[in-house]
Image (cartoon, helix red, strand yellow):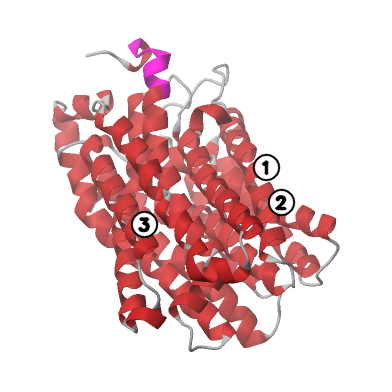
Amino acid sequence: MATATEIPSRTLRRTTIAAAIGNTVETYDYAVYGFLATVLGKVFFPASSAGTALLSSFAVFGSAFLARPAGALVFGPLADRLGRRAALVASLLLMAGASTLIGFLPPTDSIGIAAPIVLVLLRFTQGLAGGVEYTTAIIYVAEFAPPPPPPPPPRVQVGSLAGFLIGAVVVLSLNAALTPQQMLVWGWRIPFLLALPIGAIGLYLRSRLGETPEFLAARNDASERDTKVADQWSRVLLLVGVSILHILGIYMVYTYVQSYLIQLRLSPFIATVVIGFALLVGLFLVVAGGRASDRKGRPKVLLATSIAVLVLTYPLFAVLSTAPPLWLMICCVVLLSAGPAFYSGIAPITFVQLVPVRVRGSVIGVSYNVVAALVGGSSVFVSQALVDVTGDTRAPAFLLMAAAAVSAVAALVLARRPARHPEPSPSIAPMSAEAGS
């Protein structure tokens, strides 16, 4: 069996792209729903007031996250027993299929209450797929090229942000080309239908993947075979703490903030342009986070980034809430998203290095997705609810600050714990943004 150092760089690159494209599909689907939240609120909740329809749309957005722990419970053990590849193929089929069906779903005006019910069921199906997609992908690429090469999970995170960016570009293009009425009648369907060809490409690539060398080696390792999920509680708690800022930060700044800007009287077109620019900057910050953690150590950089988010979030929201000039608004959104993006270049490999090979699919999958269910899907709903209840447009800042505080504590604990795997050599050139996209 070839070791990691014997695997050709071309194979590693193809493997990483095949793994990352599923995350691109996942975040693309979540992004287009978030970017179209105001339109979908009118399509599926037409009898509600504008504010209630938006909250209802965000609640449906969150329903997918509630399904993620169930997906992890089903597919995580599958990834540990049958292999990472089988779980990756299954998740992509579910994700792309559900998104395509949303694109064909009749509106409430046509089929009544069945429309929002079916929408929730399809979002729930997406959540089942999401419960294994991201975590299995980062495990796959990390095990295919374990240290001493640079850990590749940040490339997967680049693929995830690329999904947000593609979603922003698609919605932006539609808003520019279609009238609001056309978007309401049929334009909103196009982004969901585009998930089908993207998913087909990903499925083709994933069907050609092999199993990871590290997983195959663990099958024959007696000490790994004796590893039990029930013995991993200390690692689970650390995973939960580290992942809170990673999950809440990404979904809040790249999904909710677009609707927030629209409520500040920006047009959907301009609001999406602002988010798209922040996403473009975020692609480079993910890579920068991975580089910084290779040089300084993951716990130190996680802690520093968490503190920076904790300190800067409220002032940035305070400036945004005044509806400043567009140039200043762009600066604030870029700075607001910079911390979560940078942090996301560090968190994934931290998960993988913390957990033994034999139980990674189960432990990382369940831990990460429980947090996703609790804070990821609810972040957009709670952020909007905070504004509606308090009347203070700065209120969402406190949610992101709380996440940063919890993750800072986890980073402090992590700093006192020896790494399970050796750190990669800083002399190895880090991954490029192009490799992850």
x and y percent of residue 373 in the render?
39, 65
x and y percent of residue 347 in the render?
49, 44
Circle 1 — which element? helix
Circle 3 — which element? helix
Please give the range of residues in magenta.
6-13
Query: Badge 3, how many Cα within 10 Å: few under 14, some, many 20+?
Result: many
Per the model, the C-alpha gap separating discs 2 and 1 is 7 Å
Per the model, the C-alpha gap separating discs 3 and 2 is 29 Å
Which amino acid type corresponds to the residue marked 1 in the rendered image? Val
Q: Which residue is mark 1?
A: 281
Q: Earlier in the sequence, mark 2 or mark 1?
A: 1
Which amino acid type corresponds to the residue marked 2 in the rendered image? Val
Q: Is residue 409 above or below residue 63?
A: above
Residue 233 visible (yes or no): no
Q: Which residue is mark 2?
A: 334
Residue at the spot x=61%, y=32% of the render? Answer: 296
